[in-house]
Amino acid sequence: LLESYLAVQQHHCQMKEFLIVLLMSLVMRTVYFMPFHISLLHPFLSIMNYVEQLYLCTWHKDYKVVLK
């Protein structure tokens, strides 16, 4: 039962990773095509950086659970 739970957790983690990558690529594509001024883009990029750090932290926590 524990093994199947861990497999589900791993699958869920992979899905989450896929969705975040997809979302980020869509967002970046939108930003790329819009003629934004760099000063407008800066706060957005720092938010993206923060989200990425947050995501990496959660992903590593999930990954440690899977490894046990």
Image (tube, helix red, strand yellow):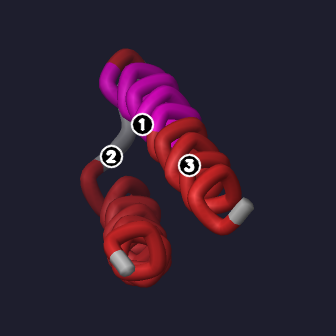
Residue at 31%, 25% in the rendered image: 32
Q: Residues within 10 Å of mark 1 (few under 14, many from 20)?
A: few
4 or 44: nearer the eye? 4
Residue at 33%, 72% in the rendered image: 67
Q: Earlier in the sequence, mark 1 or mark 3?
A: 3
Front disc: 1 or 2: 1
- Three-letter amino acid code at disc 2? His
- As helix, strand or loop, the secondary structure at mark 3 comes to helix
Residue that badge 2 annotates: 37
Q: Earlier in the sequence, mark 3 or mark 2?
A: 3
Front disc: 1 or 3: 3
Residue at 45%, 61% in the rendered image: 44
Q: Is residue 52 magenta?
A: no
Residue that badge 1 annotates: 21
> Gap between marks 1 and 3, in whole Å?
21 Å
Q: Position of residue 30 (x, y in %)?
A: 47, 23
Please give the range of residues in magenta: 18-32
Residue that badge 3 annotates: 7
- As helix, strand or loop, the secondary structure at mark 2 comes to loop
